[in-house]
Amino acid sequence: METDRIKWNQRFGVADAYQGGHPSPFLEREIERILRLVPGKRALDLACGEGRNSIFLARHGFRVTGLDISDVGIARGERQARAEGLEIDFRRQDLEGWHIGEEYDLIVNFNFLLRPLIPEEVGALAPGGLLLFDTILESPQLLATHNPDFFLRHGELVRIFGAFEGEVLFSEEISEGDMPTARVLFRKAG
Ligand SMILES: C[S@@+](CC[C@H](N)C(=O)[O-])C[C@H]1O[C@@H](n2cnc3c(N)ncnc32)[C@H](O)[C@@H]1O
């Protein structure tokens, strides 16, 4: 949506790095297991923002496509990738109503919740492919001021991914702190 593009361009336009320069701690923590299990090197970073996770994956030898609605976020990712001599296929893309037309060995979805895209993500995984999903979990504080549809419900991720053919290799929900989070690492059946 155009309003999302404008909102995110403004956020990325003012901060040095909106999510910080480092990759997601979950991705960093899981990278050894990912490298051991992943069936190939094609990776997709959905709503990649400034590309911190795309860049981290490219450093680990993945051929990464990073998609985001924000051209400001994408431009920052491209700049950083160039500075490191990494080739990443960053593209501006509105993911609402979009269909994933290619197959990937690894898909990452961080801090972005678009429920109708989840079955598409699993569908786009190669056999044995891995998917990391990590985003904000509902909490009394958040629900007091925001639309509940923006947050994962307790138990929702495991229920969703448990219904697909494959295995939830890791899951956790962290309710404490400023940013309650739910995450899973899913492997599609081979
Ligand atoms: C909280 S940021 C997360 C960025 C990145 N995944 C990370 O963890 O660093 C949310 C991202 O979702 C993107 N976004 C919001 N709506 C979108 C849409 N409809 N299509 C594609 N990207 C969208 C924003 O531009 C923003 O980069």
Image (tube, grey):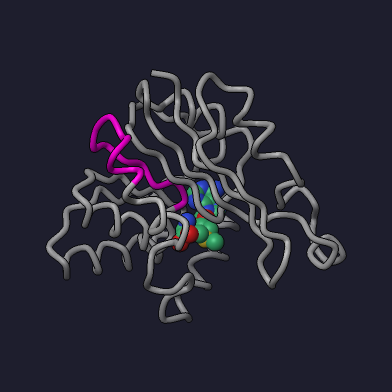
Q: Is residue 158 left or right of residue 5?
A: right
Q: Residue at x 56, y 34 (%)?
A: 117
The answer to if 42 sits in the magenta stretch is yes
State the quadrant of the C terminus. top left
Q: Bounds of the magenta span?
A: 33-47
Residue 97 to residue 9: above or below: above
Quarter residue 97 falls in:
top right
Q: Nearer the viewer, residue 26 or 64?
A: 26
Q: Residue at x 41, y 35 (%)?
A: 130
x and y percentages locating residue 71 in the rendered image: 39, 60
Q: Is residue 77 left or right of residue 142?
A: left
Q: Residue at x 38, y 59 (%)?
A: 28
Does any portion of residue 149 appear in the rendered image? yes
Q: Nearer the viewer, residue 144 or 95?
A: 144
x and y percentages locating residue 175 in the rendered image: 73, 61
Q: Residue at x 45, y 38 (%)?
A: 131
Quarter residue 187 falls in:
top left
Quarter residue 125 falls in:
top left
x and y percentages locating residue 62 in the rendered image: 23, 45
Residue 12 to residue 53: above or below: below
The answer to if 21 sits in the magenta stretch is no
